[in-house]
Amino acid sequence: MSESDGLDSLRVTALAEDSVLYESPCLGQHGVSFLVEGTKNSDVVRILVDVGQNSQALLSNMKLMNVSPLTIDAIVLTHCHYDHTHGVVNMLKEIGKGDIPVVAHPDIFRPHFFSDPCLRHVGVMQADSEEKIKKTGARLCLAKDPVVLMSGIMTTGEVKRRTNFEGISMGLKTIENGRVKDDPMLDDISIVANVNGKGLVIVTGCSHAGIVNIIKHAIELTGCEKIEAIIGGLHLIDASETRIKRTIESLSELNPAMICAGHCTGFKAQVELYLAFAEKFSPLHTGMKFEI
Ligand SMILES: [Fe+2]
Ligand SMILES: [Fe+2]
């Protein structure tokens, strides 16, 4: 991605997150949803990244924030988890356009469950199945490769695992060819935007691929090493102290101008991020808006 391929500006709005801003009338929920709006010349593309798990709360927040579902051009689902995908069919009905692209990894509809303390499916719910999404008229774009959403914004596609400290540690399972196996969450994708004169803005769902892996992948994809912002979940809530420490060391080397992390980031990691990045770090809340 050369300078001329970048965006003139980018706006990211947190439509849903576990917490809300102080005195905000918005509703929190366990899950995330972002509106990512890219502007280039006179073109504006509005991408809904994830839908949380509670469409009523999401739609209520959208109304409060003056975001009409009718203006959404595409949906990206960052991974299968119900707290990012539940209600996507409802949302597509609200958007009410045929052929709207829904971008995700091809494995997103696989069986995906915990067995501890008892069997529980935590992937895409039946109400949001592949068939039901297609029935709304939406166009599923399932790709392991990066998908360009507009010149200057793309998905990461499947993220190459490079670090030796960012494994999956949640006891998640899947079934492949009739065999139960650990789920490596290869479907975890993020959004990468390149803003002219600023650098990369990376918007993540849960960063199950590992935030350092994701950033390095984004740098490789775009050729841009300047990181303007990291916004989203970092899934360090169940990480060891060693992993948190090594993640923060790597992030410090990558030198982002801003990190705004919440959802599954976890309190301990948020504290360590604040200690390392001071005012460059902020916890993520529903209702936050970033103009880049
Ligand atoms: Fe999540
Ligand atoms: Fe997740």
Image (spheres, rainbow, N blue to C red):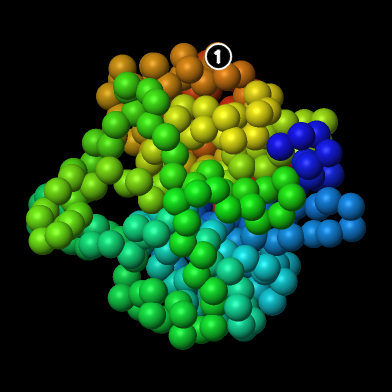
Does the rendering let one see residue 281?
Answer: yes
Name the quadrant of the C terminus.
top right
Does the rendering let one see residue 22?
Answer: no
The percent position of residue 84, horizontal first and vertical second, equals 43, 58
Position of residue 101 relative to residue 4, above or below, is below
Observer-nearest residue: 81 or 21?
Answer: 81
Observer-nearest residue: 76 or 286?
Answer: 76
Looking at the image, residue 255 sits to the left or right of residue 261; the answer is right
- Circle 1 residue: 253
Looking at the image, residue 23 sits to the left or right of residue 5; the answer is left
Position of residue 238 relative to residue 18, above or below, is above
Name the quadrant of the N terminus.
top right
Observer-nearest residue: 71 or 200?
Answer: 200
Looking at the image, residue 237 sits to the left or right of residue 87; the answer is left
State the count of labels: 1
At x 55%, y 48%, the residue is 146
